[in-house]
Image (cartoon, rainbow, N blue to C red):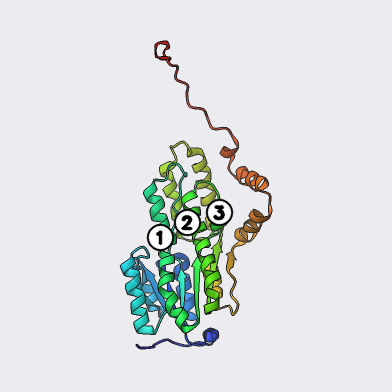
Amino acid sequence: MKDVRGSSDSTRAWGVPPVVLITGCSSGIGRAVARQAVSAGFTTVATARDPRTLRELQAAGCVVRPLDVTDDAARRGLVAELDETYGGVDALVNNAGYGELGPFEEVPPDRWERQFRTNVFGPVALAQLVLPGMRARGHGRIVSVSSMAGELVLPVGAAYHGSKFALEAAMEGLWLEARRFGIEVSLVQPGAVNSNWGDNVPALKEYASGVYGELVAEMTEQMARRLPRGSSVEHAASVVLRALTDRRPRLRYRVGVDAHVLLPLSRVLPARVWTAWVRKQFPSMRRPAPRPAHTPVPDGARP
């Protein structure tokens, strides 16, 4: 087994130069985390489904590997390779994920399933693979990029919110179980981020003509307005790096003004007040839905 890890003053708290595995590095927060991690002295393994998207990170000093987090063989193969080459994974950043948007009633079950495979089952499986080595070494960090959507719910995002709620519950359970082994677990909860997450806005158009079309239009307009004014990916990545390097890391780190304001409010306000505020953001939710047209039943057909 060969140990080829680098060293840096910024990583001395680990006791050894750390190796960090990061998923979803093709763009956005994951790419920014990889850049900041390699600059901070981590041996940084940046992954994405398409390795061609990682050439910039490779030039910046990252080790790049292809990885589809929903592929069990790919997950196992990569972790085994890192165990052999570097002596193990010291830190895991579960960043890969996406948002399946659409009304609860109209998002097909197979899309719900794909959402959970990517946002929940993949991160959980990767964490299970790196945990034995972390326990054996007596240290480790697992940081999962969640969302403020993991604690509060807005319309037209039930599948996405469901996956983030599940991820948060799973990682909080791990946090409770793993700390005595020297393994720290954190969740990073960004609010609006000015990244390619906004690519989800056009996807809502397929629901625009449905029963919930008016609500979909309102959410589309809100996202198109809010996301460009959100936190930068560099700021979000810096919070992930803080979770990786804090001597006493917290379970949850919030990113952005909206996350810092809305998450506490959703916890302390009475449910009726919080729901009234959410409804206020979406005028169509405050109006009764139109009743279906009544079709008279011919007299001869009545029982």
Residue bearing mark 1: 118
Q: Earlier in the sequence, mark 2 or mark 1?
A: 1
Q: Amino acid at mark 1?
A: Thr
Where residue 9 appears, as percent x and y from the top left, is 53, 87
Which disc is residue 163 wearing? 2
Q: CA distance from mark 3 to mark 2?
A: 22 Å
Where residue 222 appears, as percent x and y from the top left, is 54, 48
Which disc is residue 24 wearing? none
Which disc is residue 226 wearing? 3
Q: Amino acid at mark 2?
A: Ser
Q: Is residue 273 above or below residue 50?
A: above
Q: Earlier in the sequence, mark 1 or mark 3?
A: 1
Is the C-beta separation of discs 2 and 1 under 8 Å?
Answer: yes
Residue at image position (49%, 53%) is 162
Residue in the foreground of this view, choosing between 151 and 59? 151
Q: Residues within 10 Å of mark 2 (few under 14, many from 20)?
A: many
Label 1 sits on a secondary structure element that is: helix
Quadrant assignment, res 3: bottom left
Residue in the foreground of this view, choosing between 119 and 125? 125
Is the C-beta separation of discs 1 and 3 under 8 Å?
Answer: no
Q: Residues within 10 Å of mark 1 (few under 14, many from 20)?
A: many
Can residue 298 be seen? yes
Q: Amino acid at mark 3?
A: Arg
Q: CA distance from mark 1 to mark 3?
A: 25 Å
Residue at image position (39%, 45%) is 108
Residue at image position (54%, 58%) is 150
Label 3 sits on a secondary structure element that is: helix
How many numbered tags mark residues here?
3
